[in-house]
Amino acid sequence: MTKRMAKRAAAISPFHVMDILAQAKQLQSQGQDIIHMEVGEPDFDTPEPIVEAGVKALKAGKTHYTPALGLPELREAIANWYQDYYQLDISPERIVVTPGASGALLLVMGALLEQGEKVMLADPGYPCNRHFARFVEGDINAVPVTAASNYQLTADHIEQHWDDKTSLALLASPSNPTGTVLSKEELELLSNAVKQKQGTLVVDEIYHGLTYDGFKATSALAIDAQTFVINSFSKFFGMTGWRLGWLVVPEGYTEVMDKLAQNLYLAAPTMSQYAALAAFKQNALDVLEQRRQVFQQRRDALLPALKQLGFTLPVTPQGAFYLYADCSKLLNDKVPDSMALSRYLLKEAGVAITPGLDFGNFQAEHHCRFAYTTSEERLLEAAERVGQTIKRFS
């Protein structure tokens, strides 16, 4: 029998990093010590105050559906967070609680993107962004970006690459895989450029809170209330497995988001929403600030170590927990591209990293991503192993 598959499903590529992860786990099961730098998940467990709140909710029988838009108390708490952290007055009515940032992306694409319309985004960038667009029968206007623009879209890119099929521009600040951040001035220019094209701006802010060197990311909501902003409890708040995110929409869009949420997933996980109420308490925030400082220390240790090995990193990332490195100088006939390098380092060095192919097409074969989501000691050990392995094939 011929296997039937919709074209939209066939057009969505798998995460190559998941193949690396599967191979890494297989090697671990055979007794090999693997240093994981491939998956974008913090190694810290969820802060105890948040866990306690989740357990308390379960014991209290908080196991039933919530409204599709989320617990009213949590929407209020998120609105208060925007006031406390950004000094922004955001109505709770504009906040939609979702099952992870992925749920928020699905709502945005489903509500805004018509069949055949394009989303403009940076290449390299987070792969699911383009896949969500394809899932709702949309298309992608991928713009190659380099260190010259801090690996971000610019107003000039909007002017040069926008076409009559493009309707949305999707930014990420801090970005995955590069960790770069858009300044307030850059956001203003981008917002104005998209408006001039009569388009809609969507900004992924899921790594907000994880910025370094005294730098604080500006929310796009401070620029224009008509922007759609996506955030998550996964990264800064350390709640990856709880699957909880949120979306801030302009006034007038709550009803359509409510309708789509009801039909697509009904509601975000109830216990996760009650747990997240504790994420904004000072005892949890104190833990999260300590962890932010640890991430900066890890970045500052790994960045020079990779440069010494021959990786090129022209930009010091200001946020997230990734280093996007050019590995061109290390490639040869035996290891011709970043995918081959990733596989070779896993097998020979026991170091798992992500090939650039996961993040787009532009110069992907010459780049790889290192996630500094393990201890500084293990990061430096990984660099030492990589260095010894490189010597063997160079």
Image (cartoon, rainbow, N blue to C red):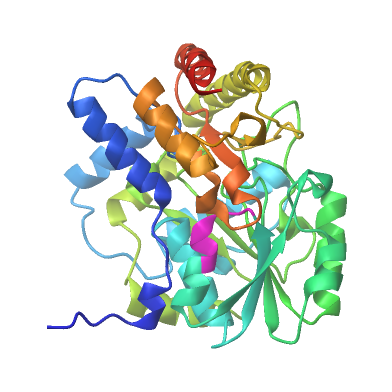
Rendered residue at 42%/79% (across/down) = 260
Q: Residue furthest front?
A: 333
Q: Is residue 177 visible?
A: no
Rendered residue at 53%/75% (across/down) = 109
Q: Is residue 56 visible?
A: yes
Residue 371 left/right relative to 228: left
Work out whether 67 lies above or below 138.
above
Rendered residue at 77%/65% (across/down) = 224
Q: Position of residue 220 (x, y in %)?
A: 73, 57
Q: Quadrant of residue 294?
A: top right
Residue 51 left/right relative to 167: left
Is 305 included in the stretch rendered in magenta? no
- Of residue 239 and residue 296, the one placed in the foreground of this image is 296
How many numbered marks appear?
0
Q: Quadrant of residue 155?
A: bottom right
- Of residue 86 and residue 146, the one placed in the foreground of this image is 146
* Magenta highlight range: 124-130
Which quadrant: the N terminus?
A: bottom left
Q: Position of residue 125 (x, y in %)?
A: 60, 54
Q: Position of residue 202 (x, y in %)?
A: 65, 66
Which quadrant: the C terminus?
A: top right
Q: Position of residue 300 (x, y in %)?
A: 66, 19
- Of residue 287 and residue 357, the one placed in the foreground of this image is 357
- Of residue 69 and residue 160, the one placed in the foreground of this image is 160
Work out whether 71 lies above or below 283.
below
